[in-house]
Image (spheres, grey):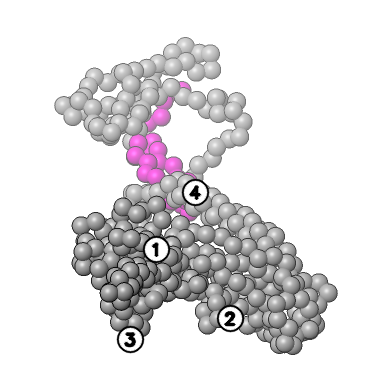
């Protein structure tokens, strides 16, 4: 009887001990490359079955919107965060973990993105107990290989700069040389972030060109996640000292521009002068033979023009032109004293002759003297080439005036 009482008192104690558990997680963060799959470990200690427990994976401040919820021995997809739909499941932290029966409640996450870099909480509850643990996920991105450039300075020194971009999280930058020196002191290390959360790093160091054969710049996230680049240093005597090349290039550019504008201005001026000369030298489209037939030879006419205007006035005579003998393209004034060039024949010359008119002139202060009409035949002058000689085209016909 005493044995039965002792057994009845021990059964509740055995049940409480069986329901007691704790949640275990890794002590450090879990690192995973961008776009890969990862398992976030979480297990019960002691390794009792978790099939009858509630397992909730969520991010802080999102308890009601979990990444994964296991309840009543199945995954509750209706309450799952939409951004993790189809990407999460209950996984295993190893082949001997045993799954939920062995107390393994690890989270399997596929196609990791930059937004997944956060803290994940593994929450386990039963009717009598609630336990939780946190796992930090770090998404890593390897940046570009470092780019080194060397700028010589005075005194045999060299200014070496190193730049690399596209890293996550923030990387470390270390300088080293061929002499075994590592972690050389750089002047500064600068970091910048882009819109996607990636980090760029820049650093520079001033070193002697003859102190080492090469200089190395290493950018890394952790051991095995690093990129290195080396540059060979020249001796101080072979390092060219840079000068103000930008200023010389500007001066050369301005000089060439001025010369080019000057040449263009000269060409435009010459073309304008040539065009004006060509317009002044335009002649009718007549052959040489046609011009020789229309124009008399210079030897046939001798023109003597006195230089004194008074002599010209003494030789003046009063002339009346004849309408009958005038060319149809010449237009006479009504008093028959003046002749003009007419583009169209006058109606009078087309229809017939008109009445001849006479004029009387006084000569040397004497009375009027009868004057016979001098018939003048005027040939229409044609434009001449520059090389032609001046010609006279007036031929006197009929008797001279009676003195």
SS of the residue at dot 4?
helix
Left/right of residue 367 with respect to residue 399 in the rendered view: right
Q: Label 1, label 4: how many angstroms apart (C-alpha)? A: 98 Å
Mark 3 or 2: in front is 3
**Dot 2 or dot 4, earlier in sequence:** 2
- Residue occupied by mark 2: 228
- Residue occupied by mark 4: 272
Q: Label 1, label 2: how many angstroms apart (C-alpha)? A: 45 Å
**Dot 4 or dot 3, earlier in sequence:** 3
Number of disc labels: 4
- Tell me what residue is drawn at x 33 percent, y 21 percent: 333
**Residues at discs 1 and 4 in contact (Cβ within 8 Å):** no
**Dot 3 or dot 2, earlier in sequence:** 3
In x, y percent, where is residue 71?
24, 63
Q: Label 3, label 1: how many angstroms apart (C-alpha)? A: 25 Å
Crowdedness near tag 1: few (<14), some (14–19) or many (≥20) residues, C-alpha within 10 Å: some
Foreground of the two, 279 or 324: 279
Mark 1 or 4: in front is 1
- Tell me what residue is drawn at x 32 percent, y 25 percent: 332
- Tell me what residue is drawn at x 35 percent, y 29 percent: 340
Instruction: Kindly indicate the quadrant of the structure image that contains residue 231.
Output: bottom right
**Dot 3 or dot 1, earlier in sequence:** 3
Q: Label 2, label 4: how many angstroms apart (C-alpha)? A: 67 Å
- Residue occupied by mark 3: 95
**Dot 1 or dot 4, earlier in sequence:** 1
Could you tell me which quadrant the N terminus lies in? bottom left
In x, y percent, where is residue 182?
70, 81
SS of the residue at dot 1?
strand
């Amino acid at each position: 009887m005493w044995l039965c009482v002792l057994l009845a008192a021990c059964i509740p104690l055995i049940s409480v001990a069986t329901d007691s558990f704790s949640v275990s997680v890794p002590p450090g963060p879990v690192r995973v490359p961008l776009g890969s799959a990862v398992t976030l470990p979480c297990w019960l200690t002691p390794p009792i079955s978790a099939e009858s427990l509630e397992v909730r994976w969520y991010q802080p401040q999102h308890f009601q919107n979990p990444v994964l919820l296991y309840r009543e021995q199945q995954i509750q997809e209706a309450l799952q965060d939409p951004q993790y739909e189809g990407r999460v499941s209950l996984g295993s932290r190893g082949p001997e973990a045993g799954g939920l029966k062995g107390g393994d409640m690890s989270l399997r996450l596929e196609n990791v993105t930059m937004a997944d870099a956060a803290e994940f909480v593994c929450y386990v509850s039963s009717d009598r107990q609630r336990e939780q643990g946190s796992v930090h996920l770090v998404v890593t991105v390897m940046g570009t290989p470092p780019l080194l450039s060397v700028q010589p300075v005075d005194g045999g020194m060299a200014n070496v700069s190193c730049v690399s971009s596209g890293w996550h999280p923030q990387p470390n930058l270390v300088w080293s040389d061929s002499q075994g020196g590592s972690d050389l002191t750089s002047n500064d290390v600068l970091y910048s972030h882009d819109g996607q959360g990636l980090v760029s790093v820049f650093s520079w160091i001033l070193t002697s060109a003859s102190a080492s054969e090469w200089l190395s710049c290493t950018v890394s996230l952790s051991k095995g996640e690093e990129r290195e680049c080396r540059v060979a240093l020249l001796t101080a005597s072979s390092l060219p000292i840079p000068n103000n090349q930008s200023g010389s290039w500007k001066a050369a550019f301005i000089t060439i521009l001025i010369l080019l504008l000057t040449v263009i201005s000269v060409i435009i001026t010459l073309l304008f002068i040539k065009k004006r000369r060509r317009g002044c030298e335009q002649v009718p489209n007549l052959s040489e033979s046609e011009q020789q037939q229309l124009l008399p030879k210079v030897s046939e006419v001798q023109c003597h023009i006195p230089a004194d205007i008074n002599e010209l006035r003494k030789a003046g005579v009063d002339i009346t032109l004849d309408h009958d003998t005038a060319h149809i393209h010449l237009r006479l004034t009504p008093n028959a004293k003046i002749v003009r060039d007419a583009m169209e024949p006058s109606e009078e010359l087309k229809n017939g002759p008109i009445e001849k008119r006479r004029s009387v002139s006084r000569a040397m202060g004497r009375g009027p003297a009868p004057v016979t009409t001098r018939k003048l035949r005027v040939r229409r002058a044609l434009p001449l080439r520059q090389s032609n000689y001046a010609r006279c085209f007036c031929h006197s016909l009929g008797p001279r005036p009676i003195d």
